[in-house]
Amino acid sequence: MSLYGVVETGGTKIVCAIVSGPDDVRDEVRFPTTSPEENIPQIIAYLQKHHKQTPLTSIGIGSFGPIVLDRSLPNYGSVAPTTKPYWSNAPVVAPIQQALGIPVGFDLDVTTAGLGELQWGAGQGLQHIVYYTVGTGIGAGVITNRSPIACLAHPEAGHQRVSRHPEDDFVGGCSFHADCLEGMASGPAIEKRWGVKAHLLPPDHVAWRIQADYLAQAVMNTILFVSPQRIILGGGVMEQLHLFPLIRQRTLERLNGYINLDAITKHIDDYIVPPALGNRAGMLGALVLAMRAAQR
Amino acid sequence: MSLYGVVETGGTKIVCAIVSGPDDVRDEVRFPTTSPEENIPQIIAYLQKHHKQTPLTSIGIGSFGPIVLDRSLPNYGSVAPTTKPYWSNAPVVAPIQQALGIPVGFDLDVTTAGLGELQWGAGQGLQHIVYYTVGTGIGAGVITNRSPIACLAHPEAGHQRVSRHPEDDFVGGCSFHADCLEGMASGPAIEKRWGVKAHLLPPDHVAWRIQADYLAQAVMNTILFVSPQRIILGGGVMEQLHLFPLIRQRTLERLNGYINLDAITKHIDDYIVPPALGNRAGMLGALVLAMRAAQR
């Protein structure tokens, strides 16, 4: 039986755990995200303590972004320049790998959650999925042939262009692009537009029709760029499950018959789906990263 | 020395050739695209004639789309349902492979041209490129790890959403989506909007600023979904080379500092580039398909 160290670094908290498989969490700890100077030694201390008791096979880390994933670069495994205080250019993989001396897998948080869903959740048995998180921000993990797409950098599809809905005069909430997808359809964008938190808007409120249109545009672009076998929409905003039928219908309307694939035109209910793992997706995805790192 | 059969099926003409390498075309023939009943036997007859003289190693075919690329499907290698008369569901690979009995590589025309540019043109030495053709229609070949991305189907990024330019009141020319990228930025869209063919508009005409904005949106979305190492913009419209500086500038403006990659922010002139192979890209890409088919 192999033991793995899994780490999720998020905007507000960091979760570390020792697991042997998806249903066997041996130990878990959480601490607030502060600075790399404080957090990286905390992560190392936790992993080392367990590694001394029973050797870990490998480690998997799902990190908030942007991160550097190009293995040919000297700063592979660090946080890229970011507006988040303290973390710009902070190495993550290198200090942990040096301290533990075992393989470390590393990827973006949303991609990691997508890997979890692929392996044990809503993407089981598939090769190609795209996983969106729609919450405080919007991110997308793009997985083809069971591996995250990684060219110059990881996808940033939360900032793709959307066309403004005719009934929407909200200026947009993205500080970089105003009315990009994240600027129009994140949780904070909905709250700014309507003056109340998204989950307090009744299901028949026009807000949801507008929201579904923006997400349908994202789904359509995803089909046109990647044509995954399934698109999983997760994150806090997508807990409003009444959004799914609206998004499915609007996607078909927007595609307007152009894409002629049974998986989409005849089985849209199985094509645009909620996640199956809830908030466990990140940790299970980090386990996938750890297991794959051990096999490299 | 190996000989390969290469085939380009286009909307108006079909080109078949016998080549040994990128600079050695031994024979070439062209005939008008009519129906599969007429054209497929023509292609077979041409290839067979040469195969009997000197055996061909393999065949590469770059085809107009949409096409079926999922090898698990019984109709792999055929044209998908299309508005183009006669060609819906026409098998292409199967009859040619049966008649010749040698390996056949097959991909979409624009992807095939992208493979040619990757191997011998503007993408030499790279792993990840996206090649757009902007002409009568707009298509994109997405190549990661030197292979075409192929999930449920090939990309159809010509139909991605774009935000309308504030100075543009053209309704859009796409019969499926009106104001998608192809609807706003193809050659016929420019001609319909301004009443003259694109190449007759002077370089300082507002048309080009609008055109550059739509293509910059496409470039931006491409970076956000795929982050290729280079984006090559080809096709008839892109022969207006004065578009390139406008697109580069507008892309940086639209990204607005969000993507922090030197390859883009510091080297945009090497990031968004014209093709290097001109109208030879398709045939050279078909040669890449043939060579790869021989190695499978």
Image (cartoon, coloured by chain):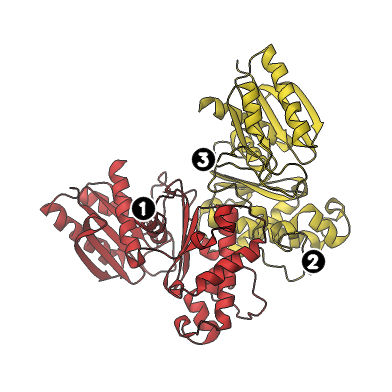
Chain colours: A yellow, B red
For disc 2, the neighbor class at 10 Å (few under 14, some 14 to 19, many from 20) is some
Identity, as a three-letter code, of the amino acid under mark 2: Phe
Percent x, y of residue A86: 76, 42
Residue closest to the eye, A197 or A75: A75
Q: Are marks 2 and 3 on the same chain?
A: yes
What is the distance, in whole Å, between disc 2 and disc 1 at their CAs? 46 Å
Left or right of A283? Residue B40 is left
What chain does badge 3 belong to? Answer: A
Spatial CA distance of label 2 from label 3 is: 42 Å
| Residue denoted by label 3 | A72
The chain letter under disc 1 is B
Which residue has dot 1 on it?
Answer: B119
Dot 1 crowding, Cα within 10 Å, few <14, some 14–19, many 20+ = many
Could you say which quadrant of the image residue B13 lies in? bottom left
The circle drawn on residue A86 is none
Give the residue type at disc 3.
Ser
Compared across the picture, whether A230 is left or right of B120 comes to right
> Who is closer to the viewer here, B11 or B263?
B263
- From the viewer's perspective, is A180 left or right of B208? right
B279 in relation to A68, above or below: below
Q: Residue at x 67, y 17 (%)?
A: A51
Task: Say which of marks 1 and 3 sits in front.
Answer: 3
| Residues at marks 2 and 1 touching, judged by CB atoms closer than 8 Å | no
Q: Quadrant of residue A16?
A: top right
Which residue was labeled with disc 2?
A170
Q: Residue furthest top?
A: A53
Local SS, label 2: loop
Q: Given this view, does label 2 or label 3 mark the residue nearer the observer?
A: 3
Would you place residue A219 above or below residue A278 in this image? below
